[in-house]
Amino acid sequence: REEKDALSYIRGRIDISAMSRSPNKDRVPCNFEDFTVDIEDNQIVAWTLYTILRSGLCTNKSISTVRRAERLLNNSITLKPFCGSNCIKRSYNRLNNDYETMHRICRFFLENAGPTQNVGDRSIMPFLVDMARLFEVFTARWLEEHLHNQFIIRRQESFNIDENGTLSEVMDIVLYDKITHSPLCVLDTKYKIHKTVQPADYNQMIAYADALGCQKAILIYPTTLKQPLDAKKGNIRVKTAIFDLSQDLDISGQALLTQILGVVC
């Protein structure tokens, strides 16, 4: 940072104009740069430590180390909020290249920081997240983004169970042929952790496929099943697929696409 001061020695550049206005035999007005620890590189680390301490992630073994590091930085560094995107596309050189690895670690924690069930220091309205619905919508949006050139994708399509239309069912996702507009496959997301497919879910997919007049149905789960399903009833094939939420979502999403195309194509 730029500093201006009257020193007993020369540092940086002599401020000639200031010296001419008020000559002082004992002090020399100088313009110079001074190093400070209160820079953004350190502020990112300080905010990450602050976030980690309030996340509930620390064990009894690690919390004392993290708390000691936070206190050390907070004595001289301004606490400012940052997010994961602030940790990327930064410029590094021989003076600050040690920060590159630290900022990568900071990005991991800041991008994955969120609300917890622990008591915090701020008030908030209580809310519930419908994870089954969220998983359904997220999966549908992913498929829309990556398969829209190959198929027509419709979400929340309903059909009547009885002729009067008093009873109806809603299907999560249906893939249609882009040329003939005929249904190719019905997909249903199941935010469940089971070892095997539940009979009710299997029968549901048979009913959906039969109502649409298509021969393929896929049950999508958020985690690997111990006993995957690939079964046929008449001319309808029901298969399981996985959108693994515990892994990198880009990689898991591509794996899901491969599973779906293996059934449909």
Image (spheres, grey):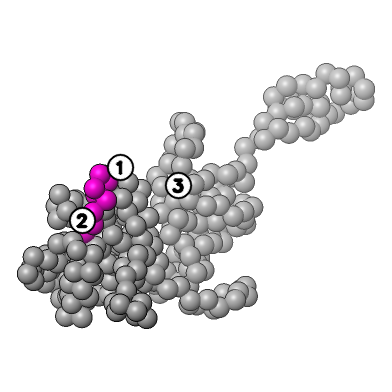
- Using the image, determine if residue 257 lies above or below residue 68: above
Magenta range is: 177-185
Type of amino acid at the residue the image marks with label 2: Leu
Type of amino acid at the residue the image marks with label 1: Asn
Label 1 SS: loop
Label number found at residue 3: none
Task: Rate crowding at label 2 as few (under 14), some (14 to 19) or many (20 or more) other CA atoms within 10 Å.
Answer: many
- Using the image, determine if residue 64 lies above or below residue 252: below
Q: Position of residue 192 (x, y in %)?
A: 27, 75
Mark positioned earlier in the residue sequence (1 or 3): 3
Residue at coordinates 81% horizontally, 26% vertically from top-left? 28
- Using the image, determine if residue 93 lies above or below residue 254: above
Type of amino acid at the residue the image marks with label 3: His
Residue at coordinates 89% horizontally, 26% vertically from top-left? 24
The part of the image, by quadrant, that contains residue 46 is bottom right
Q: Position of residue 92 (x, y in %)?
A: 47, 34
Residue at coordinates 36% horizontally, 61% vertically from top-left? 155
The residue singled out by tag 3 in the image is 103
Q: Position of residue 4 (x, y in %)?
A: 77, 32
Label number found at residue 149: 1
Q: CA distance from mark 1 to mark 2?
A: 15 Å
Residue 178 is inside the magenta segment: yes
Label 3 SS: helix
- Of 127 and 208, the residue lying toward us: 208
Q: Position of residue 75 (x, y in %)?
A: 62, 57
Q: Is residue 197 left or right of residue 30?
A: left
